Amino acid sequence: MLNVSSSPVRERLDRPGTDAAAQLPAHGALWLMQMLTGALDALDYGMLLLDTTGHLVQANQMGHQHCTSAHGSCRLQDGQLHARSSADEPVLQRALTQAAGGRRCLLKLGEAPHAETVAVVPLSSPLGIRGGDAVLLVFGKQQVCEALSVEHFARVHSLTHAEGMVLTALCGGDEPSAIARKFGVAVSTVRTQIASVRQKTQAASIRELVRQVAMLPPIVSVLGHEAAH
């Protein structure tokens, strides 16, 4: 494995006013691109990189899922991004045109319960290459946190299996009474489990507990990554 911290590669990366990829040797640039691709796939946000005409250049794992899911707000046709709903199409295309001109915006595409919020962000070529500009689309999270992140959070705080299930349900927006019906237990049992989870995580309230989970770094399933590719 390449040791960046003590190599000439690291020295070039740390040099101010330089482009990291341009400073790396050929094999180092490939390594960097592979690492960046893996890093983007690990994010719990769908991301699409488009050229200024709306053609797909790159998509991370979650972005690929957004475009291929039957409930996704966007789709790809011959490499061109389109809204799945005809009503959303002019809105999306207008946003892409504006982004090509340097304007960013936030869109709401699709209809409930599958509506998605999408940030449209213009990107300028760091090398000043004409025609090198691009547009980044970032989809809102589909859930508070990845299931694996919640699972690891539960392990770190020594939650029982039942407490972990209750925590997952709380993060999904379920009330204690709904959780009790879902798992076939008394509401008093669920409230006791919530109190135990709050004690172990030092959360002052359910809201604070959910906030802790929402701020967790994503741990994306390896199986999901392989399926997306």
Image (cartoon, rainbow, N blue to C red):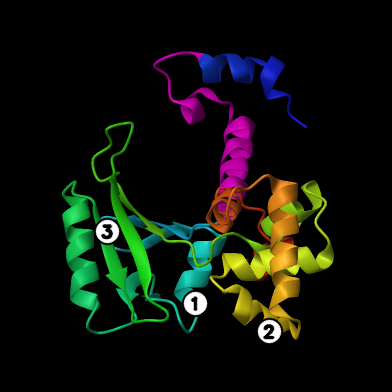
The 10 Å Cα crowd at callout 3, few under 14, some 14 to 19, many 20 or more, is some
Q: Earlier in the sequence, mark 3 or mark 2?
A: 3
How far apart are the alpha carbons under marks 3 and 1? Answer: 21 Å
Image quarter of the C terminus: bottom right
**Eye-nearest disc, 1 or 2:** 2
The 10 Å Cα crowd at callout 1, few under 14, some 14 to 19, many 20 or more, is some
In the image, residue 131 lies at what x, y percent?
25, 46
Q: Which residue is mark 2?
A: 182
Q: Residue at x 78, y 47 (%)?
A: 156
Q: Residue at x 73, y 24 (%)?
A: 3
The 10 Å Cα crowd at callout 2, few under 14, some 14 to 19, many 20 or more, is few
Q: Earlier in the sequence, mark 1 or mark 2?
A: 1
Part of the protein shown in magenta:
15-43
In this rendering, does residue 174 appear at all?
A: yes
The answer to whether 154 is drawn above or below residue 91 in the figure is: above
20 left or right, relative to 132:
right
Examine the residues drawn in magenta and state their main secondary structure.
helix
Foreground of the two, 15 or 210: 210
